Image (tube, helix red, strand yellow):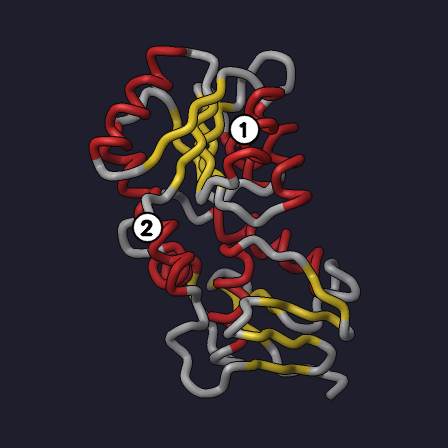
Amino acid sequence: MKPTILVVDDEKPIAEILQYNLEKEGFRVVVAFDGEEALQRFEQESPHLVILDIMLPKIDGLAVCRAIRARSDTPIIMLTAKEAEFDKVLGLEMGADDYVTKPFSAREVIARIRAILRRGRRGAGMALSPPSRLEQGDLAVDLDLMETYVRGKPVDLTYREFSLLVHLMARPGHVFTRQQLLNQVWGYDYVGDERTVDVTVRRLREKIERDPGDPEYIQTKRGVGYYFRRAPHA
């Protein structure tokens, strides 16, 4: 079955270019031209990935991203004509997995889509065998089901957050630089800056830590990167 990509952009020429190139690469493409239609098409089509413009009529792209993320961990790539770092970081804060700044090349977008879908199919933990479950303190990860539990309750993580958590948990105490995490979790063909790692870590901490400001698990090695600390209360 062909992976379904939902393309959301109110600029028809851009949507058509993306649709043409994606279909040529073997994807099934669904197009929406405003935020309301995007949410309707998302519910109807259950796409494997969403390409989402920030500037949309009716409902803006950030609100659409937030609404999708509230109900699904489907990967989202944001399209933005804005160069400001604030706009890129804000999109990631809303739950996007990646962003592309206009103007962009179709080849770059397709490369990012393939990297995300490939990583999602494998799952960061799928290469770990055994165990099929990682546990530290009141944090547990089921690698087969790709589910995360905090104090026995399920926590919704995006596939990128899940991948990062498993990667860190698999080697507790090992310090990873931001660039290493970009290469190993996002993929060697990922094109992006290291702030992406910081944003994802911050979102992950907000979901799994008792106090995100004083984390128990995901620790910062100042000036270097991040590592997973074994449960201090175990």
Which-is-in-front pick, marks 1 and 2? 1
Q: Residue at x 49, y 86 (%)?
A: 131
- Please name the amino acid that badge 1 sits on: Arg
- Please name the amino acid that badge 2 sits on: Ala
Q: Is residue 222 above or below residue 48?
A: below
Residue 188 percent across, percent down from the top left: 28, 55
Q: Residue at x 47, y 78 (%)?
A: 174
Query: What element does badge 1 sit on?
Result: helix
* CA gap, disc 1 and disc 2: 24 Å
Residue at which label 2 appears:
115
**Quarter where residue 141 is shown:** bottom right
Query: What element does badge 2 sit on?
Result: helix
Residue at which label 1 appears:
41
Q: Is residue 83 found left or right of 213 in the rendered image? A: left
Residue 205 percent across, percent down from the top left: 66, 60
Instruction: Name the image quarter holding the C terminus.
Output: bottom right
Circle 1 Cα neighbour tier, 10 Å, few/some/many (<14 / 14–19 / ≥20): some
Q: Is residue 195 above or below residue 181?
A: above
- 198 or 58: nearer the viewer: 58
- 221 or 89: nearer the viewer: 89
Q: Residue at x 59, y 42 (%)?
A: 95
- 48 or 136: nearer the viewer: 48
Residue 12 percent across, percent down from the top left: 39, 11
